Amino acid sequence: MFFVGLAVLDPLVVALVAGLRTAGVRLAAAVMTLDVVANWIVNWPQLRADPAWLLRPVGLLPLTLFGLFVLATAVPVLRVVTGAAGRPAG
C-alpha cells in the first residue's frame, strides 16, 4: 500500500519543492527515508540469500545512495528555500 501511495506522494513532493515550500523539503526527506526503509525490509530476504544482489545497478544500492543524497542535502536546501521565502520577488 505504501508503494502505491508513492504515486501520489512523489508528485506532491516535486510540486512543493518546485514551489519553494519548506514543507516540500521536509516531506522529501521523510518520504525518501520511508521509501529506503521499506525497500530494505521488502528486499532483505533476497539480500540475505545473495549479498552480491546489493551491487546490482538497479535496486537497493542506487535507491539507498539517492536517499542518503536527499537526506544530506535536505538541511542546506531548507536553508536556501527559507532564505528565498524571505526575499521580495523580482
Image (spheres, rainbow, N blue to C red):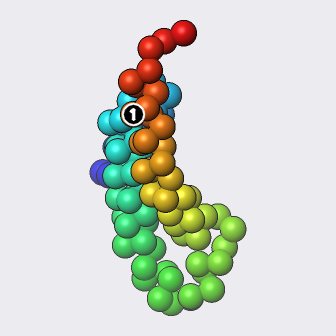
Name the residue at 37% across, 72% down. 41
**Image location (x, y in percent) of residue 55:** 65, 78
31 or 50, nearer to the observer: 31
**Image location (x, y in percent) of residue 35:** 40, 58
**Res 11 seen here:** no
**Res 19 seen here:** yes
Residue under pointer 1: 82
Q: Quadrant of residue 12?
A: top left
Position above or below: 7 against 40 = above
Position above or below: 25 against 42 = above
Q: Quadrant of the C terminus?
A: top right
33 or 17, nearer to the observer: 17
| 49 displayed left or right of 23 | right
Count of numbered labels shown in the rendering = 1
Name the residue at 43% across, 41% down. 79
Near mark 1 (Cα within 10 A), the count class, few <14, some 14-19 or many ≥20, is some
Q: Amino acid at mark 1?
A: Thr
**Image location (x, y in percent) of residue 67:** 49, 59
Most distant residue in the top direction: 90
Position above or below: 45 against 80 = below
Label 1 SS: helix
Position above or below: 79 against 15 = below
**Image location (x, y in percent) of residue 13:** 42, 36
Name the residue at 43% across, 63% down. 36
Name the residue at 60% across, 80% down. 53
Q: Quadrant of residue 25?
A: top left
Q: Quadrant of residue 22?
A: top left
